[in-house]
Image: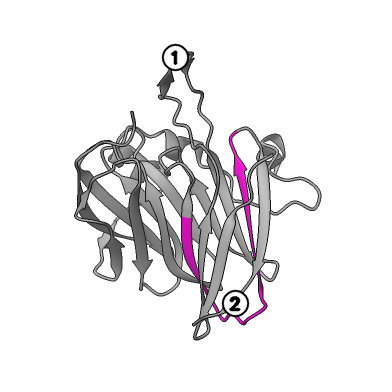
């Protein structure tokens, strides 16, 4: 099973700055090892929801770096709001993680 | 609907996701990528900010951030013009999201990074060069 994502959502005014770090090999299918080519294995879709409503729908290629990073900003957010992130890869593996928006410093 | 069911994206209780644009991601040259994205009559815009390092020392992890100040931005696409498959990512921006995305890309060599923003049905674009000293695909 995939490792959990690291998600941080910090409020700055009424905008939540969201930073997501996903654990995934994002293989391009062109990497050679002693046992041959490592097959294509990458996240194709990422959905970010704010209190259950989809606000960002990302389609990715294998050119996104290994252990992908995604940063975005959510308008009209408040402390305690739920930010959930779901990714799906080309093998149909998926994972959802969720955090609450925290107050900024 | 049928396509979504066939690709396994839509199951009971599942979140609807925009279908992965196979032909756009398979395009091997920027002109073909733009065509598959349906991006026509591109308007050069200073309201799109592309934030990248001038020089990337590690082509495996190049930070790229795109901000669009164009009202009613619907989507932001990132095209790494000299990558084998130039379309790196496409983000659908729904109400509630600020038109800003940042991520990290693999880039094989020095190249232009192009942002294509769709807003109110029109397409806008901006471009920036990144010098890559150690390529990121091998």
Q: Which residue is nearer to you in this view: B125 or A17?
A: A17
In the displayed image of the protein, which residue is found farthest to the top? A35
Return the x and y of residue B105 as percentages of the image width and height.
37, 46
Cα separation, mark 2 vs mark 1, equals: 46 Å
Discs 2 and 1 lie in a common subunit: yes
Secondary-structure class at tag 2: strand
Q: Is residue B34 above or below residue B43?
A: above
Please give the range of residues in magenta: A70-90
Task: Give the residue number, with chain letter if any, for mark 2.
Answer: A102
Q: Quick one: label 2 or label 1, which is nearer the N terminus?
A: 1
Q: Is residue B17 magenta?
A: no
Q: Residue furthest bottom?
A: A13
Quadrant placement of the N terminus of chain B: top right
Taking the magenta stretch, the answer to whether it contains residue A77 is yes
Residue B120 visible in the shown view: no
Q: Nearer the viewer, residue A20 or B50?
A: A20
**Residue B1 appears in the rendering:** yes
Q: Position of residue A82 (x, y in %)?
A: 67, 70
Magenta segment, principal secondary structure? strand
Residue A34's mark? 1
Badge 1: residue crowd in 10 Å (few <14, some 14–19, many ≥20): few
Residue A83 is left or right of residue B26, and the answer is right
- The reply, left or right, for residue B29 in relation to residue A53 is left
| Image spot of residue B23 (x, y percent) | 46, 36
Q: What chain does badge 1 belong to? A: A
Mark 2, Cα crowd under 10 Å, few <14 / some 14-19 / many 20+, is some
Q: Is residue B112 above or below residue B22?
A: below
A44, B74: nearer the viewer: A44
Q: Circle 1 sits in a helix, a strand or a loop, which is it?
A: loop
């Amino acid at each position: 099973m995939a490792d959990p994502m690291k998600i941080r959502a910090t409020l700055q005014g009424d905008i939540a700055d969201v930073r997501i770090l996903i654990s995934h090999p994002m293989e391009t299918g062109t990497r050679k090892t002693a046992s041959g080519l490592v097959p294509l294995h990458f996240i194709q879709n990422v959905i970010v929801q704010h209190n259950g409503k989809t606000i960002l729908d990302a389609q990715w290629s294998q050119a996104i770096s290994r252990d992908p990073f995604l940063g975005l900003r959510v308008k009209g957010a408040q402390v305690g709001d739920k930010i959930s992130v779901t990714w799906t890869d080309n093998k149909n593996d998926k994972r959802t993680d969720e955090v609450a928006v925290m107050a900024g410093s | 609907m049928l396509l979504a069911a066939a690709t396994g994206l839509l199951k009971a209780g599942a979140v609807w996701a925009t279908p992965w644009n196979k032909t756009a991601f398979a395009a091997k040259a920027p002109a073909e990528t733009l065509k598959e994205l349906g991006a026509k009559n591109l308007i050069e815009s200073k309201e799109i900010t592309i934030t990248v390092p001038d020089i990337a020392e590690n082509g495996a992890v190049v930070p790229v951030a795109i901000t669009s100040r164009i009202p009613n931005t619907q989507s932001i696409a990132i095209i790494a013009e000299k990558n084998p498959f130039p379309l790196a990512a496409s983000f659908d921006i729904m109400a509630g999201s600020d038109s800003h995305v940042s991520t990290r890309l693999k880039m094989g060599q020095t190249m232009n990074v192009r942002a294509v923003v769709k807003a109110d049905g029109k397409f806008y674009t901006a471009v920036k060069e990144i010098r890559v000293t150690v390529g990121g695909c091998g």
